[in-house]
Amino acid sequence: MNDKQIQIQSAILELENPYPNDNLITCYKDFLKVRNFLPCYKYNPKVFQSLVDLTSEIWDTNQRINRISLLESLKKYGKNRDKERGENIIDLPIETKTRIFLLFKGCFDEPERLSANQINDAKNLCNYLLINIVLRVEEEKWLCENTGLSENVLNRVLRYPIKSEVITNWVKGNYNMDIYRIRRAELASWLIDEDPNFEIDKRTLILDFGYFNISDVKAIQEYENEVAVNNIIKERELNGILSSKNLFDDMESNPELISSIPELRLTHRHFGISLDSSKDSRLHIPDFKKMCKNFYANIDTTFKITMLWAIAYSRLDSKLKSELLKKYYCEETYWSFFKICKRLKLIKSLKWLKDRQH
């Protein structure tokens, strides 16, 4: 088919939204015929499983295949399942779940079948496929042992859909590790699973805050050092062609410099950040003195908001979550409470919230 024929056929299938035959995809040749149209079909679990099986079986072969296209098709077709069924936990055969896990694991352990430009895409796509999937104990252990490999692996641990002794024990052993402090609410959610009355110690929040500040100060210093070195190198390379303007002006007048500009990575905080007005506004550098003052003045609110999200992330049933959430509601936590109830579809809690607005 040419591009227009593909476009028209996609429109027809999108409107008809047919239920595909179980044997729609039995080989790679079948996949190539339908990959442009697959998202237009209703979800058939056997078609999804066949595509997982096909991807798994030919992944490590020397066959000329588009591995990223296979993963993208799995993601797009899997979205049809989520739209139709809306399940939190995805019900798939054990073999299918294991094959998805092994594809994810292989992106880290054996990425040789992918080009350097494809590896991150493959990791992200496989990560999506694992969302809300319950794995075997040995697979949970691999995730816990390899959280340092990628944010994707850490997400699959902290956002695992059901209670897990393996993950709970990992959280207990890593609860106060500096590198995980930014995930405080998610960490606490696992302790709430075990004890619904668990509360985050405010001293822990203070230590978290202090670590974020130290990390950001260090990041800013390293960034400024890199910028200074880059400026010197560029000035030498261009023989003084660059003016003495600031770095951002140099970037605008010399686009080729963009690739040499270092990136400032600051902590992604879950509460308000006061910016230093004396610094370039495009860098969003915090005013640490003002932020410290605000943090300690509002630590009770920070505690309540963090507890709200910890309860939301937990794997407790909706009825118990609703009761626990009420404990941390106040005017200052309104938006968090509202967002959580809407996200979790807690209708009774939203009605309870409505009755308290005057």
Image (tube, rainbow, N blue to C red):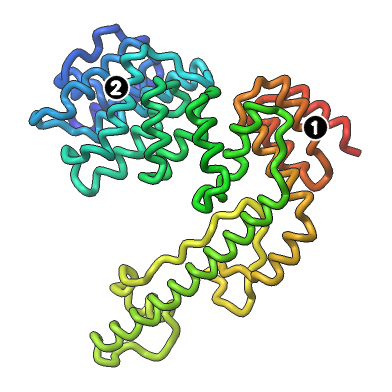
Residue that numbered label 1 is attached to = 326
Disc 2, SS = helix
Three-letter code for the amino acid on which mark 2 is drawn:
Arg
Residue 126: percent from left, percent from top: 34, 32
Q: Is residue 203 visible?
A: yes
- Taking the image as shown, residue 107 lies to the left or right of residue 336, namely left
Q: In the picture, which quadrant includes the N terminus?
A: top left
- For this rendering, which residue is in front, 223 or 9? 223
Q: Are marks 1 and 2 in contact (CB under 8 Å)?
A: no
- Taking the image as shown, residue 8 lies to the left or right of residue 267, namely left
Q: In the picture, which quadrant includes the C terminus?
A: top right
CA separation, marks 1 and 2? Answer: 41 Å
- For this rendering, which residue is in front, 134 or 334? 134
Asked which quadrant contains residue 29, the reply is: top left
Say the numbered circle drawn on residue 99: 2
Three-letter code for the amino acid on which mark 1 is drawn:
Lys
